[in-house]
Amino acid sequence: MKFRENSTEEYTRGRSTGRAHSGSEDEAIMNGGHVGAERASITSRARRSDSPYVESIMHGRTLSDDSPTRPAECHWHMVFVERDGEALVVFVGPWTTAGVAHYAEGAEILWIKFKLGAFMPHLPAGRFLDTETVLPGASSRSFWLKGSA
């Protein structure tokens, strides 16, 4: 995968993997659905979580290259992306404004949307406001988080 550098609107070094969902959009997707403007560019299924820290979990696939508008979002996310045998873990901070997300066809994505108030002390969400940060990979099946893989 290739990702662009130095952008708060896109994942580092190239494509973003989708967009955050909010409010009424969540309701439409909870039973499975398509996200995209006039044509489906992502297919996904979501569910609410019974965890006191996780709002919802969504699993999906990108059906085509796209650059949809993503809404502002007060929650932070961990996004796991697999495409062409490469895996990424992305820490997505809250978004204060709407923006454009960019992603390519053929990715499998798992979004974990955390509840308001949930936090990781070593990754304060305020420090990641309006950013997406790719966490370093330790191997093809693990990533680094607070010094452990």
Image (cartoon, rainbow, N blue to C red):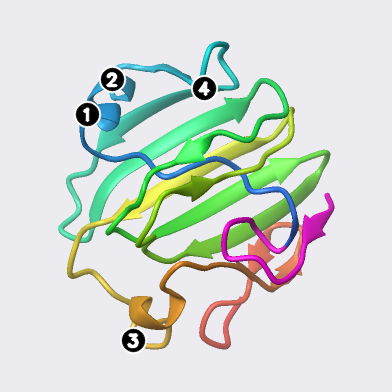
**Circle 4 or circle 2, nearest the eye:** 4
Between discs 3 and 4, the one toward the N terminus? 4
Q: Measuring 76% from the left and 68% from the top, which residue is drawn there?
A: 5
- The residue that label 4 is drawn on is 36
Tell me where residue 30 appears, x and y as whole percent: 28, 24
Furthest residue to the top? 39
**Circle 3 or circle 1, nearest the eye:** 1
Instruction: Check if residue 142 falls in the magenta segment.
Output: no
> Is disc 3 placed on a helix, strand or loop?
loop
Q: Are the residues tagged 4 and 2 within 8 Å (C-beta)?
A: no
Q: Which mark is residue 28?
A: 2
| Viewer-closest of 5 and 52 | 5
Give the CA distance from mark 3 to mark 2: 33 Å
Image quarter of residue 20 = top left
Q: Which residues are magenta?
A: 1-12
Name above or below for residue 28 compared with residue 95. above
- The residue that label 3 is drawn on is 121
Give the CA distance from mark 4 to mark 1: 15 Å
| Viewer-closest of 54 and 41 | 41
**Circle 3 or circle 2, nearest the eye:** 2
Give the CA distance from mark 1 to mark 2: 7 Å
Q: Type of residue at label 3? A: Pro
